[in-house]
Amino acid sequence: MTGISVQNAPFTDVFERVKRPTFLEDAVEYPCLGVRWYGLGAYIRETKLGGTIARKEQWRVKENDVLYNKLFAWRGAFAVADKIADECIASDKFPTYRFDCSRVNPDYLRLWFRSPQLADQAQALSKGAAALSKLTLNPPDFWKLTIPLPPLQQQTEIAQTVMAMLTSIERIERARAPLDATIHGRRAGVGSQVRLVLDAALADLNSCFVSDLGILDEVLTMRPRSGPSFVVSEEGEGIPVIMPSATLGYRYDAAKCLYGLGGEAVSPKDILTPGDLLISRGNYRDQVGICIVYPGAAEERTYANLLMRMQVDRARVMPEFVKYWIMSPLCVHYIRKHTKGTSPSVQKINQRALVAMPFPRGAALNVQRTWVERLDRVFDEAEYLERKIREQYSAIQAFKDNLIRAAFDGRLEC
């Protein structure tokens, strides 16, 4: 049996509005519902005392209700309530409905809520600005949404086929989750599984020079200088500002740049030049100390306040050698030891600690160049492997979307 080949039916044919107003009592705890994006269901967002909820009239949800988030319908925030959601409350941002089970199979409906086609419809009907909190699908426009409605038997077959395939894909995702988490969540660190060879090479770097160490300050011609602080945006007309995210992975990402609003007074010492070292002075603990060599750009650029700029005496050291040294286990350990903060997300290292970092004395430039060339090759291979893993992850996500899309446009064989 092929996929769907019927006309879409309006939501008015399938749903009816249901309202169960509930007036909250101050001393009673209420489980409050949210709706995940991309049709991934309703969930209990939090449990709160009625006295802490400003709007005293809420709406009670029953199992098998349909609800959606008015603000994120364009992201597919639709759900069929399951047992977990039964008797929970939702605000007026989550209108509730009943569906006609003689017209639509519940599992088929859940699958439609995951479809890119429905999210596209919702986005076209939503009103307001493009900002996340402004694009709204109001209840009168809910009725303008549509759903393909083949016979119930075909709906059941489509839902069973697609859900079985999604289950298999999700089993693969769970199996590779540790590797994906390493690549996506810890690319900034040197400890990822893919970079074990790089770790070993950097450990060799330490062992070659550990017998004669001075401090980083001995080779600096510009001590670490924090970037300027002013308002930036994606659409500003002022000077480009390199953000800390541009340094993740220890390679400069030119796309991670915002812009001043215009008219900023920027010191000449805050204008970057090719070969400058940029190091993260504050962020999550495993991101403090991430360092890149700035390659230069066609226009003048400055850098964000959570970054520090350094310059080295190029008659004595290569900036690229300094970067790799800062990546090495000895320096990573030093940076972690001297990073302080009030919470995991607010960690910083100061200039005094940074310039006192151990650094090799007397390494000839030709020796440094040999190390840089060797580490570049290892780094390139590690990045190649990481890129392949990220591409595989993206392909799996895209395959799920394409599978669900195919289920509703006649391309799926059941």
Image: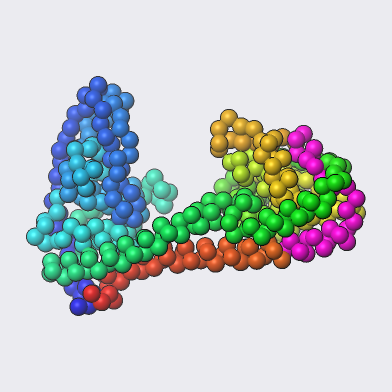
Foreground residue among 198 and 253: 198
Q: Main secondary structure of the magenta part?
A: helix
Please indicate, yes or no, whether residue 126 appears anywhere in the rendered image: no
Q: What residue is shown at x 34% (from left), y 65% (from top)?
A: 168
- The quarter of the image holding the C terminus is bottom left
Which residue range is magenta in the image? 352-376
Q: In the image as oriented, which residue stretches furthest toward the left?
A: 102
Q: Is residue 111 above or below residue 49?
A: below
Q: Quadrant of residue 200?
A: bottom right
Q: What residue is shown at x 71% (from left), y 66% (from top)?
A: 377
Q: What residue is shown at x 29% (from left), y 76% (from top)?
A: 411
Pinpoint residue 397: horizontal percent, then vertical percent.
Answer: 41, 63
Q: Quadrant of residue 26?
A: top left
Pinpoint residue 385: horizontal percent, then vertical percent.
Answer: 59, 65
Q: Quadrant of residue 83?
A: top left
Q: Is residue 12 located in the magenta-colored stretch of the structure?
A: no
Pinpoint residue 27: horizontal percent, then vertical percent.
Answer: 25, 21
Q: What residue is shown at x 88% (from left), y 53% (from top)?
A: 363
Picture colour scheme: rainbow
- The quarter of the image holding the N terminus is bottom left
Please indicate, yes or no, whether residue 30 appears anywhere in the rendered image: yes
Q: Is residue 374 located in the magenta-colored stretch of the structure?
A: yes
Left or right, 95 with respect to 117, comes to left
Q: Number of numbered discs present?
A: 0
Pinpoint residue 373: horizontal percent, then vertical percent.
Answer: 78, 64
